[in-house]
Amino acid sequence: MLIERNGKLFRRYDKELLCIEPYGVNGLRIRATELADFQDDTLSALIEPEHKTYDTEIAIEGDSACIRNGKLRCEVLCTGKMKFYNQKGELILEEYDKNRLRPNAPGEADSALEIIPRTFIPHPGTNNYSLHVRFEAEEGERFYGMGQYAYPFLNLKGCVMELSQRNSQITIPFTISSRGYGFLWNNPAIGRAAFGRNITEWYADSTKQMDYWITAGDTPSEIEEAYAEVVGKVPMMPDYGTGFWQCKLRYRTQEELLSVAREYKCRGLPISVIVIDFFHWTAQGDWKFDPKFWPDPEQMVKELKEMGIELMVSIWPTVEEKSENYKYMEEMGYLIRTEMGPRMGIKNKDTYMDATNPHARSFVWGRIKEHYYDKGIHLFWLDECEPEVTKYEYDNYRFYAGSHKEAGNIYPREFARMAYEGRKKEGEERILSLTRCAWVGSQKYGALVWTGDIASDFATLKTQVRAGMNMSLSGFPWWTTDIGGFHGGNIHSEEFKECFARWFEFGAFCPVFRLHGFRQPLVVESGKTAYQGGNAEGWIYTSGAPNEVWSYGDEIYEICKKYMFLREKIRPYIQEQMRQAHEKGTPVMRPLFYEFPDDGRAWDVEDAFLLGPDILVSPVTEKGRREQMVYLPEGNWKNIDTGEIFSGRQSVCCRAELDTIPVFVKADRIDIILPKEM
């Protein structure tokens, strides 16, 4: 039976209840369940759109129906199968239905496969199901977005994506299709997405309902902006965010950190942020400085501010058994739970706060406010926020919001929400937190994501270029990478120095320009346990090798200086892009096809990107490379290294010596970087 109610289309057939409703510009929200009714929106990523006046219509003809919102139209056939069309009448997506046990819709072929588009398989004795949702695959279709994975691909066609959070993996189940639609799998359950040649499939391991959102648009930008309207946009980027960030694993004392900041200022180098990494605390879960090593945080903040430097401090959600807060948090139910076995991790006897519990968030923010915020530290690095549970045993963990299998992917969003709402309550507006993980909606809580604990080599550098573009298309215009990677870079290695220089050049044109890494050789004092030892006392005395721009010798230092000052020149331009991100959801870092969707060759470029609409960057990601072919889309482009101007729609060979990354600026916007007379 099909009915219209309150502007929504409902269909009941046997066990399944289906609802299709206009949602956002040119968008539809699609839900289905085999329960009596739909669940509340506790686990949904969707928000109330700003624009609620839609161009909609619903028509029901017998056991078929049609619903339209702006440029998107959905047909519901008599079998329950759905087809989606754009405003030109072109079919852009249809469900995969191969079943002869139901009556055929007109024009639909018979099949003995007995596969239906939406399959709910019950978990006996519960109200949860495993869910498969299937769509027809189209040859030549391209998919982009989906968050951040360690894949060397921009186009994800042919990929199977695990929908789960891990260190260096961020699941954002939103994709832009080259066929002119955007698709959000609005479900935080552990699962997968498969963009095969034979089928496109979305799977949730444990859920109560199907929930997705789809929009149609003429350009990628129209799709991206419609998506931002229904999931939220980043705040306005603070001014310091577009400058240079200095970090390493790890500054061990207050004086060590201040000495580095002073050296940057003494050398006349631009620096906006400096970071205190982990194990600066007394115990995990105390959320406060160890006074032995950080005796006067207020004075430290004061001196840094006098130098024009913002201080960021690492905050973990981990709670040790010996923490002063552990017993209270355990009694109040503020810790994540296990279904079986001990709660505490083996290595440090620690567990995690339950960030999905609003009372836990309030309690932990209270500790952070007392020990950091009230001392003048307002910028936080929210690390370990997947959370990085032992072996990612999703079956074994439970949150306030539900089981890990059903709700686990929202944890990083709620951790970012804690810092955002705490700072918002203090009257702040331009709120930013560095986060190692995210889910849909984290962006509205000021999440600046990075790629986690990645390797320090050219192969990993290559993946960063693709990861940055796909993360940006996933609705996250604030993105950064550990310049030089995190694991394995020896500061005395000539090969790593080359990789570091190339990474630094790339980093200067990322939305956020941030140096970090666990460098070799280790620094160990007083015979204490090295990095791998894993106890808090050992961490106090252990650090990676120096990771300042002068740590790699004179040649690399000069390269770093060149790009630090170049970054300073383009900061006003980057701030302009940050405003577009805040107001419209526009990616700061974007693939060439985003600006040039009618250029077929632009869709093939995966090794270069645009920073805003006017700067084209082609990072060097291979050892020993000293020249590079760069495709230029339509227009006139000026090489900032040579001053040459090239017409677009061609590939050009560029010089790429160790101190040079191929960068082009639209000829009429060269004032962004260089004087107009050059």
Image (tube, helix red, strand yellow):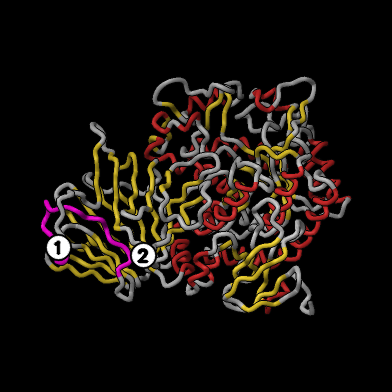
**SS type, badge 1:** loop
Q: Position of residue 56 (x, y in %)?
A: 30, 71
- Left or right of 643 on screen, residue 453: left
The amino acid pointed to by label 1 is Ala
Q: Residue at x 73, y 75 (%)?
A: 644
Determine crowd level at label 1: few under 14, some 14-19, many 20+ residues with C-alpha closer than 10 A.
some
Q: What segment carries the magenta color?
A: 91-108
Q: Position of residue 178 (x, y in %)?
A: 42, 65
Q: Which mark is residue 27?
A: 2
Disc 2/disc 1 C-alpha distance (Å): 25 Å
Q: Residue at x 73, y 35 (%)?
A: 520
**SS type, badge 2:** strand
Q: Position of residue 656 (x, y in %)?
A: 72, 61
Q: Which residue is mark 1?
A: 105
The reply to whether residue 241 is visible in this rendering is no
Q: Residue at x 72, y 50 (%)?
A: 245
Which residue is more in the foreground, 532 or 462?
462
Q: Is residue 31 above or below residue 347?
A: below
